[in-house]
Image (cartoon, rainbow, N blue to C red):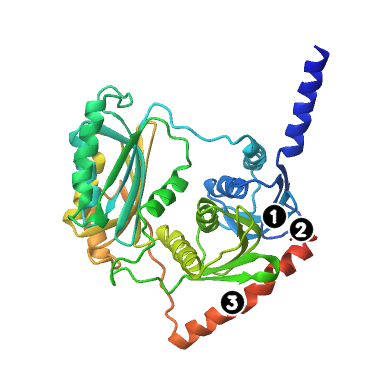
Amino acid sequence: MAMKGYLDEYEKLVIRMNTPRVVIDNGVCSSATIVKVDSPRGHGILLEAVQILTDLNLSIKKAYISSDGRWNMDVFHVTDINGNKLNDQSVLRYIEQSIETVYYGEDIEVNGLTALELTGTDRIGLLSEMFAVLSDLNCDVVDAKLWTHNGRVASIIYLKDCTSGSPILDSHRISKIEGRLKNVLNGDNDVNSAAKTCVSMDVMTHVERRLHQLMFDDRDYERRSKKYERSPMVVVTVQNWAERSYSVVNVHCRDRTKLLFDVVCTLTDMEYAVFHATINTSSDQAHLEFYIRHKDGSPISSEAERQRVIQCLEAAVERRASEGVRLELRHPDKQGLLAEVTRTFRENGLNVTRTEISTSCGMATNIFYVTDANGNEADSKMIESVREKIGFEWLRVKEMPSLIHKKGDGEEEQQTKAVLVSLGSLVWRNLFSFGLIKSCS
């Protein structure tokens, strides 16, 4: 009994030593709340911390990431979505408690629903056809997310039976759902466009991380045609620092919510470890710099690998970049609602580039990003015509695309060079000034 008591105390000590420690400070910075996280090194720990912050729709304005030996020291400057410091004590407690449980590897599971994963060829009206099939098969869409990029589409949909409200378990019915949707998704007979569907009852991976994984596995980062050219607003460079065996990754793009999550998620799933990083935002621009190695401690070793990292990070930034007008539908939930709404979009020439579907307490809250059939900004008259048909009180315009200042070639090239020069020394200056690193070799 004495030995058992000793082991219990030893286990508690090990847990205390390895549990991330969180300090939240609202007094140091006048414009942001500081979240400091000390944690043991571990693959994916940084991603988990960033995920917790971004899932609360918080904006990470600055961040300093450092690894000293076997310990991570991370500092995040965060605000709410309106740019204000965090004063809600319940939110602050949630951040502390959630990050401190990262050590245990806890995940969120969706109970009582059937998860459907889809990848395939994107095209006009695809979402309308998908929801029409599900409605016809008596499936109720409770939650869903869909991304499009480079002519490809990935989606995760949570279903239940319309009649019973129970998860769909019958293997014959599941096969029928998969077969019908695969026919819709295939698009053409090109082998590279083959659709994939998967139904699961065990959903443990973070949804947005899983969407990145689905698109990565679908190789959406490969440019398929001139129609999907590289965005001039995203600049990614990768260079090796041979003396310290680091690969230095710089990302310069327009700032947006969840940007840091998207980049860190991609690096993590590509099996790279982030040892040091600096993230800075200014106006609507973001500058991110990472010092990375493979999990085995080696830097990027070939030109082909370097180019692949660049392509994958460009894709990670672009997938969630808002294309088109943001429309929000709030409507009492009913069978076939999504099929009706998306059919109205299609019949009026609107293309859905990204969507988020959620249902709570009998009310559907759905967000759609729409463009015209050519991928350009939808005409306001077209939007108002759709709103009239669906109902002005149900469908609202929440966000119009901001005007992009188009730089000349010389100005854009000069801006890119400035980013590469300034970011090279930025990370070390910030890490040392915060006392976050001593030496790491």
Picture coordinates of residue 169, whole percent (x, y):
30, 25
- The circle drawn on residue 195 is none
Residue 83 picture quarter: bottom right
Residue carrying label 1: 75
Q: Within 10 angstroms of label 1, few (less than 14), some, or many (20 or more) residues?
A: many
Q: Which is more foreground, mark 1 or mark 2?
A: 2
In three-dimensional space, the C-alpha distance between marks 1 and 3, rounded to whole angstroms, equals 23 Å
Rendered-image quadrant of the N terminus: top right
Q: Which amino acid is tagged 1?
A: Val
Residue carrying label 2: 436
309 w.r.t. 17: above or below: below
- Circles 1 and 3 in contact, beta carbons < 8 Å: no
Residue carrying label 3: 420
In three-dimensional space, the C-alpha distance between marks 3 and 2, rounded to whole angstroms, equals 23 Å
Among the two numbered marks 3 and 2 on one chain, the one whose residue lies closer to the N terminus: 3
Among the two numbered marks 1 and 2 on one chain, the one whose residue lies closer to the N terminus: 1
Q: Which is more foreground, mark 1 or mark 3?
A: 3
Among the two numbered marks 1 and 3 on one chain, the one whose residue lies closer to the N terminus: 1
Q: Within 10 angstroms of label 3, few (less than 14), some, or many (20 or more) residues?
A: some
Q: Nearer the viewer, residue 283 or 198?
A: 198
In terms of secondary structure, where does tag 2 sit? loop
> Given the current orientation, which residue lies at the most extreme top position?
1
In three-dimensional space, the C-alpha distance between marks 1 and 2, rounded to whole angstroms, equals 9 Å
Q: Residue at x 55, y 46 (%)?
A: 56
Q: Nearer the viewer, residue 408 or 81?
A: 408
378 w.r.t. 99: above or below: below
Picture coordinates of residue 421, whole percent (x, y):
62, 79
Q: Residue at x 75, y 59 (%)?
A: 440
22 relative to 222 in the view: left or right: right
Q: Which amino acid is tagged 2?
A: Leu
- Circles 1 and 2 in contact, beta carbons < 8 Å: yes
